[in-house]
């Protein structure tokens, strides 16, 4: 195994003061502080909505904790898989699971049956909380897993009775998106009622469920492909998650007013970015989170922006770019917006500039990954540096490692490695993978970065996405950022493909803006003006869309897989 050089910082980071012993305690403290204010508002595309006050979040999540422990007989440390979109039920089941002393397994609602089976079996989840939109997957999933209990939740649960009734009937009979359920389940509302009864009858002891919890206790299994592509659970502790709340707060201090903000939760809460930014950080500040189940199409967000004083938007590059291309947004930008936080993938400079021009507010870029809960670096709200991922957040050490295992010097690029209180324990039941990811206690991210002035960092690209052209390194981010500045380009992705003469060639995939006549020759001419010759794409393909992840991140891996399949078929023919 490669031996990595270590860095002895001139001054060890001071230990962070956590706001609570564990996340469950943070929830209770926050709900007591902002009791009658709105904590969550779920907004449907047609404007129908439902609310939860902080006092209701506390009460109902207590009911869920009682249901899990006293009703189902779960024990401390048992895993509960929550497979819900952004809805009023999601925070209740996430918080209720942690209040029960159990471990939350965040699960993408869009997973296929094989993906569900893998994650449920790998985590050993005893309970599955599933949205009713995908109840048709249950017979096949339950036959291949050891899940003991299923709770089926409706998107409109906890909406006002009449509003919820109408919305549900529209989904069931007009849109026909709710399949019949053919296996025994407990409904979400019935589970809440059972928990309430158990508490009222004195059969549940909430205090005992969290008595042994502390910062080192396991809170969540957050599944990720990591740097090897194999889906595995990053073990995040209560201390990891609370540390990241403190670290984000330190970086935006003075710009987020506690008890007065409204944050848009359009990224899925089961994803680590929104989980920390919206569910934990903005909740902790007493903000009202506006929950949108799906951002596709982007018109789904129009009512949220029009009806609520949204002041903060955590998002990804494709979200910001897409909103800027919506007339209803660009012509009438939100008037209460104070700032936005970008992560998940590189924020294109052209998008950041347009966002500033249209909204007259900054979008500050950060960097993180699932294994670090996720925030590692973040730009300051004032003095944000375009193209940079900012500086390491408080209590975090960062070093850059060159291919020889030594430290990158000066402006030399190197793999970014992290050490800090937000870094995971390791991968669930995968000691070998843990050793690879955490040699010497430093998390190897797989991302290549360079140091800039004043301790700012800039991501050059993913280590595995690096393109080698005639012996020269080409970083897709740089080429994508160049092409994104060309008028008429909506989205772009760049990968490397094998060259018959050896090495690789650069290929760009471009989605033009509607009603534009951008040509391949224009793209190449633009690139030749701004890039060295070997970085100019040799191949350019115009498309109507690009493959994306559940948070809107463009998937270069999927493009490479497509090309590999085409090459295989061509050889076979």
Image (spheres, rainbow, N blue to C red):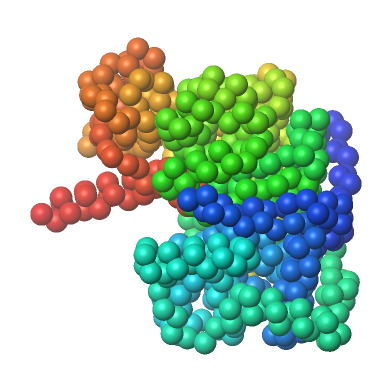
Q: Quadrant of residue 263?
A: top right
In the image, what residue occupies the spot 89% across and 46% down? Answer: 17
In the image, residue 553 above or below residue 365 = below
In the image, what residue occupies the spot 62% across and 48% down? Answer: 290
Q: Along the horizontal axis of the image, is 441 left or right of 320? A: right
Q: Residue 92's spot in the image, x, y percent?
A: 69, 65
Residue reaching furthest top? 529
Q: Residue 487's spot in the image, x, y percent?
A: 35, 20
Residue reaching furthest front? 162
Task: Work out whether residue 51 or residue 287 is closer to the camera in this orientation and state it.
Answer: 51
Q: Along the horizontal axis of the image, is 135 left or right of 512? A: right
Q: Residue 440's spot in the image, x, y percent?
A: 72, 50
In the image, residue 329 above or below residue 274 = above
Q: Along the horizontal axis of the image, is 130 left or right of 312? A: left
Q: In which quadrant will I find the C terminus?
A: bottom left
In the image, what residue occupies the spot 76% across and 30% down? Answer: 255
Q: Does any portion of residue 1 appear in the rendered image? A: no
Q: Quadrant of residue 416?
A: top right
Task: Work out whether residue 140 or residue 330 is closer to the camera in this orientation and state it.
Answer: 330
In the image, residue 153 above or below residue 315 = below
Q: Along the horizontal axis of the image, is 417 left or right of 346? A: right
Q: Does any portion of residue 320 appear in the rendered image? A: yes
Q: Residue 508's spot in the image, x, y percent?
A: 32, 32
In the image, what residue occupies the spot 78% across and 47% down? Answer: 286
């Amino acid at each position: 195994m490669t031996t990595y050089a270590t860095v002895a910082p001139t001054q060890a980071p001071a230990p962070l003061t956590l706001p609570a012993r564990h996340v469950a305690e943070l929830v209770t403290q926050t709900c007591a502080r902002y009791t009658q204010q709105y904590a969550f508002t779920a907004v449907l595309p047609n404007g129908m909505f439902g609310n939860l006050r902080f006092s209701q979040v506390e009460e109902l999540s207590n009911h869920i904790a009682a249901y899990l422990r006293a009703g189902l007989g779960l024990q401390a440390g048992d895993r509960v898989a929550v497979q819900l979109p952004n809805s009023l039920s999601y925070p209740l089941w996430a918080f209720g699971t942690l209040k029960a002393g159990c471990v939350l397994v965040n699960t993408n609602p869009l997973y296929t049956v094989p993906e569900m089976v893998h994650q449920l079996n790998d985590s050993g989840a005893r309970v599955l909380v599933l949205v009713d939109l995908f109840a048709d997957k249950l017979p096949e999933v339950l036959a291949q897993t050891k899940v003991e209990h299923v709770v089926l939740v409706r998107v409109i649960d906890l909406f006002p009775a009449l509003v919820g009734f109408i919305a549900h009937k529209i989904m069931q009979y007009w849109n026909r998106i709710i399949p019949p359920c053919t296996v025994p389940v407990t409904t979400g509302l019935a589970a809440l009622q059972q928990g309430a009864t158990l508490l009222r009858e004195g059969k549940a002891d909430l205090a005992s469920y969290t008595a042994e919890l502390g910062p080192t206790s396991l809170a969540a299994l957050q599944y990720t492909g990591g740097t090897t592509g194999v889906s595995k659970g990053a073990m995040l502790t209560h201390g990891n998650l609370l540390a990241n709340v403190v670290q984000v707060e330190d970086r935006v201090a003075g710009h987020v007013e506690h008890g007065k903000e409204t944050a848009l939760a359009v990224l899925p809460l089961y994803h680590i970015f929104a989980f920390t930014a919206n569910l934990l950080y903005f909740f902790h500040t007493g903000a009202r989170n506006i929950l949108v189940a799906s951002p596709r199409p982007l018109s789904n967000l129009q009512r949220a922006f029009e009806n609520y004083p949204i002041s903060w938007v955590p998002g990804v590059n494709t979200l910001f770019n897409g909103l800027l291309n919506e007339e209803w947004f660009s012509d009438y930008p939100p008037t209460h917006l104070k700032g936005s936080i970008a992560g998940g993938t590189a924020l294109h400079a052209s998008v950041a500039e347009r966002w500033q021009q249209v909204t007259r507010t900054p979008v500050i870029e950060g960097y993180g990954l699932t294994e670090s809960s996720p925030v590692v670096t973040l730009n300051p709200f004032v003095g944000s540096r375009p193209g940079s991922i900012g500086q390491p957040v408080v209590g975090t050490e960062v070093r850059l490692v060159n291919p020889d295992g030594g430290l990158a010097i000066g402006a030399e690029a190197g793999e970014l490695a992290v050490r800090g209180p937000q870094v995971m324990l390791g991968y669930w039941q995968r000691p070998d993978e843990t050793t690879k990811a955490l040699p010497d206690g430093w998390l190897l991210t797989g991302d290549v970065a360079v140091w800039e002035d004043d301790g700012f960092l800039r991501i050059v690209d993913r280590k595995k996405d690096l393109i080698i052209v005639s012996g020269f390194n080409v970083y897709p981010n740089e080429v994508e950022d160049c092409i994104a500045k060309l008028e008429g380009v909506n989205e772009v992705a760049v990968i490397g493909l094998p060259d018959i003469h050896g090495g690789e060639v650069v290929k760009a995939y471009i989605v033009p803006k509607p009603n534009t006549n951008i040509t391949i020759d224009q793209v190449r001419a633009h690139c030749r003006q701004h890039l060295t010759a070997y970085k100019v794409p040799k191949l350019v393909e115009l498309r109507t869309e690009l493959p994306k992840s559940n948070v809107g991140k463009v998937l270069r891996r999927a493009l490479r897989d497509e090309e590999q399949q085409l090459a295989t078929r061509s050889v076979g023919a």
